[in-house]
Structure formats: structure tokens, C-alpha cells
Image (tube, helix red, strand yellow):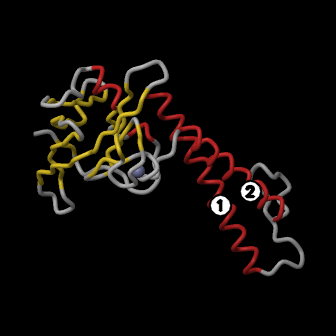
Amino acid sequence: MGGWGSGVSRGYSTTDGRLRLSIRDLRKTGNLVAGKFWLWQWSRGSDQSGSIQGSTETEKIVLSYCQRTDSGEWQDISFPVWLDWTDCNYGGKRAWFRCPFCGQRVGVLYNGGSRFACRKCLRLNYKCQREGEKDRAFRRAHKLRVKLGCRDSYTSKWRIKPKGMRWATYERLCEEENYYGNRGCQIAMTALMKCTLA
Ligand SMILES: [Zn+2]
């Protein structure tokens, strides 16, 4: 029985760090045939980062794995995922997973805590969307600095409360500027660390 820790982050994250199960890979390895039992393993570098057992039936696959609960105990989970087939233009059939949550046809499912679901249901962002998020945060911080009358709008140095602005407003804007500036830096740093480690 395979398993992985409970260290799956909550909220938004990129698809990079998730365990993914692709229907194309399953088919390529001959595991999408009814009656098959298979083991799927993931590794990060030389370490195994997770594994699941699966069995394929005519209309679904059943995933079996161990999951650590919030209280730290291991729990056996058996989880069906329905399959769907569409005709290809040049003959043959293409296989799809039906996302267990939204029912959409998808080619890849991601592990989200104790379940597998599509990217949308797990609210995952692709790396490029993350890039957009970083730029938006920096732009926002930049605008706030201009509003705050910073002499250098690329850093928050020489910040002086503009004449006529209330202290409460000034403090709120400073806080916002700090938040967005830090957020942009954080995303940029994470991306950089990933590049360095890869
Ligand atoms: Zn979904």
C-alpha cells in the first residue's frame, strides 16, 4: 500500500509540487486495460515521494492508498475515478478521467490532500499564472508608492506622508504597499529557488 505524508500545502500552489497522475502515462504503460492491477510511484530526485496502487475496470479505475490524517494516523483510502472515451479524428479512442469533483473530462489528476482532482478543483496555478501574480503584486506596490509620494517609486525608501493625507489612510496604504512588495518578492524568490535547485 503506498502513501504520502500529510505535508500537502493548502490554498494556492503551483502544479509543480503535486503528485500527478496522467491518463496518457497509464495508457502508455498498458495499465488502462480492464482487469489490470498496477502500482504507480513518484520520485523526487532519488527519493520516492509517493505511490498508489490502482486497479482498472471497464468504466473506472480504483485508486488505493494510505493517507496520514490530521491526527497523524494512517488511513486506507479506496477512491474510484470514472473513465471516459472520445473518438479521435483519425480513428481510435482517446481516454479521459472524469474529475471526481466537477465531472469534467481531464487528462491529468493531481493529489490534493486525501483525494485526486483536476487542476481547477484543486485551484492550482500553472507557473506562468504565478508569474502574472508576481507582476500584479509588484505593479500594485509600485502604484501605492507613487500614491504615497515616494521619491523613488521602485523602493519604499524616503516615504513621507503626503500633505493632506490622513494618518490612518497613510498607514493603511503603507501596510498595503509592504504587503504587495513582499508578496512579489516572495513569488520571485520561490521561482528562483526552484530554478537553482532544479
Ligand atoms: Zn474538477
Q: Nearer the viewer, residue 59 or 45?
A: 59
**Quadrant the C terminus occupies:** top left
Q: Nearer the viewer, residue 22 or 193?
A: 22
In contact (CB < 8 Å): disc 1 and disc 2: yes
| Residue picked out by circle 1 | 178
Amino acid identity at mark 2: Ser
Q: Nearer the viewer, residue 53 or 188?
A: 53
User: Which residue appears at 21% of the width and 30% of the height?
Assistant: 40
Q: CA distance from mark 1 to mark 2?
A: 8 Å
Image position of 137 (left or right of 83): right
Q: Secondary structure at mark 2?
A: loop
Q: Which residue is mark 2?
A: 156
Residue 171 vertical placement versus 39 (above, below):
below
Q: Is residue 82 left or right of residue 96?
A: left
**Percent coordinates x, y for residue 10 in the rendering:** 38, 56
Question: Pointer 2: residues within 10 angstroms few (<14), some, or many (20+)?
Answer: many
